[in-house]
Image (cartoon, rainbow, N blue to C red):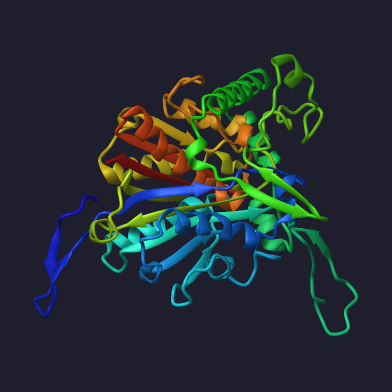
Amino acid sequence: MTGGSGFNDEQGISMTMTEAYLCDGIRTPFGRYGGALSAVRADDLAALPLRALMDRYPAIDWQNVDDVIFGCANQAGEDSRNVARMAALLAGMPTNVPGTTINRLCASGLDAIGTAARAIKSGEANLLIAGGVESMSRAPYVMSTGDQAFSRQQQLFDTTLGWRFVNPVMKREFGIDSMPETAENVAELFQISRGDQDAFALRSQKRAAQAIQGDVLVNEIMSVSVTHRGHTTVVEQDEHPRQTSAAALARLKPIVHPEGTVTAGNASGINDGACAILLASGRAVNQHHLTPVARVVGMAVAGLEPRIMGFGPVPAVRKVLAMTGLGIADMDMIELNEAFAAQVLAVTRELGLPDDAEHVNPNGGAIAYGHPLGASGARLALTAAGELKRTGGRYALCTMCIGVGQGIALVLERV
């Protein structure tokens, strides 16, 4: 996986694998459902961090960007028709810069970074922007077409989260458990108690509060001005973190069934946000006078039963560690997306990590900050790179579970 290896093709031209460097990144604050960012279209939201990167590096000739790769899970409304390309144009990027939108559901933003890194490592690209966007507040309702001519059997679905237009074979063979139902499945299978889930959720909120108070994440978040109905609001911080207590969390009712353990307090939120990260080859680093923060060591994805999708990080982590020749003990910090406390604890315990491991989500996670699906994975990489720089650690692991039964894991090394 390391750079420097090469070979000669049939014409005798030297082909050298290159390194992929994460040079910088920025994100919007993550807004609550129906909150301050809900007035911003998804394509406009995606354009904000792109424009911020352009403003941060005025000396770069942005015509040299090989591609803009953004993750987005919904793509059913204002984020349809290739939101990455539209955002690049709205941000003022030259028209010659292409854009593509990819969808690996919750991990779309992290997959975008890995995909960009692979393009650089293969030698096919030198300068890319990767990231993701999701406006869950503005997710539209969609209506099906008729199943035959003159049919009046249309269906209407809310696209904010979850299944729609279900294939009956899929339902019969694999089930169509909702995200909270998959968390309950994991909690039951791996015996994750309600008390342990609430304790983890409380730690996430407290760590996030400490990070916010200590300005740990201040360099990764841009301010956003939102004008709605003639009134302008400046959003500078994530809206989702909240003050809570063990007693308050314990009072919340389960959201799947009365005897369940998953609650709104020990689950991630429904949110809005966007993130953009600048990646470059060694050649582009020198050409544009960039300062790398970390290199992308490798990325892996894995599949598992959809009904326990929350356990997906385990096979993905094992796969990327085997690929890179590293071990879980080599990771100085881990960003594990907190879709639900139940699945995080199932994953950490399986990987041999304590429930309260200080290097796992040291600044809190999605239970506190929220989970705007397409943007969350990019946030993990941005936060992990910043934490490596701040602490002097060497390796960081970013990993997420993915709806319909997948996991993803990406390793960064501080430069």
In this image, 202 relative to 103: left or right?
Answer: right
**Residue at coordinates 56% horizontally, 28% vertically from top-left?**
212
Can you give x and y, in whole percent of width and height, for residue 111 in the image? 46, 54
Please tell me in which quadrant of the rendered image residue 328 appears.
top left
Can you give x and y, in whole percent of width and height, for residue 178 in the image? 71, 46
In this image, 187 relative to 361: left or right?
Answer: right
Name the quarter where the C terminus is drawn.
top left
**Residue at coordinates 38% horizontally, 69% vertically from top-left?**
66
Whether residue 178 appears in this view of the structure is no
Can you give x and y, in whole percent of width and height, for residue 301 in the image? 43, 50
In this image, 331 relative to 302: left or right?
Answer: left
**Residue at coordinates 82% horizontally, 77% vertically from top-left?**
146
Whether residue 31 appears in this view of the structure is yes
Please tell me in which quadrant of the rendered image residue 11 appears.
bottom left
Instruction: Determine the residue located farthest toward the bottom in the rendered image.
Output: 149
Q: Identify which residue, 331 or 205, lies in the foreground.
A: 205
Q: Is residue 188 above or below residue 282?
A: above
Q: Identify which residue, 113 or 126, lies in the foreground.
A: 126
Q: Identify which residue, 232 or 194, lies in the foreground.
A: 232
**Residue at coordinates 45% horizontally, 21% vertically from top-left?**
358
Q: Identify which residue, 171 or 199, lies in the foreground.
A: 199
Can you give x and y, in whole percent of width and height, for residue 312 in the image? 51, 42
In this image, 247 relative to 277: left or right?
Answer: right
Instruction: Determine the residue located farthest toward the top in the rendered image.
Output: 247
Instruction: Determine the residue located farthest toward the right in the rendered image.
Output: 152
Q: Total of numbered circles in the picture?
A: 0
